Amino acid sequence: MGWTFQSLIDERMKVTAFCLDDACRNVRVLPLEELRDRFGPDAPAMRDDILPRLRCDACGGKNVDLTCVPDHSARAPENPYSKAKGG
């Protein structure tokens, strides 16, 4: 089973598109909630599903790629036990 837009959101993943054009090198984090709302929560969201739909929003080029990593800025609430122990 592959990623869907909803599963990427649920797992707190961050998908970043970046332009491979040497003159551009634009980088943008994809708005997963907007993509989910547009294509549906169960729409496939694997690299090969997303790439054909992408264009660089700076230069308009199709020579783009993606990275997908956990979004550490959306961490779970602080653990009170860990806080009490100084962690």
Image: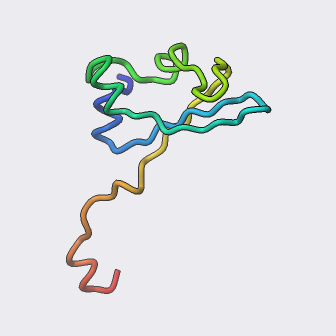
Residue nearest the observer in this picture, 59 or 54: 59
Tell me how the rendering is colored. rainbow
Residue 9: image location, x then y, percent: 31, 38
Residue 43: image location, x then y, percent: 32, 18
**Residue at x 61%, y 28% (from the top left corner):** 65
**Residue at x 37%, y 18% (from the top left corner):** 44
In this rendering, the count of numbered labels is: 0
**Vertical position of residue 26 compared to residue 56: above or below:** below
Does 32 sit left or right of 28 as displayed?
left
Outermost residue to the right = 22
Classify the position of the C terminus by image quarter: bottom left
Does 31 sit left or right of 41 as displayed?
right
**Residue at x 57%, y 27% (from the top left corner):** 57
Outermost residue to the top = 52
Outermost residue to the left = 80
Residue nearest the observer in this picture, 25 or 72: 25
**Vertical position of residue 34 compared to residue 40: above or below:** below
Classify the position of the N terminus by image quarter: top left
Does 59 sit left or right of 67 as displayed?
right
Residue 14: image location, x then y, percent: 44, 42
Residue 19: image location, x then y, percent: 66, 30
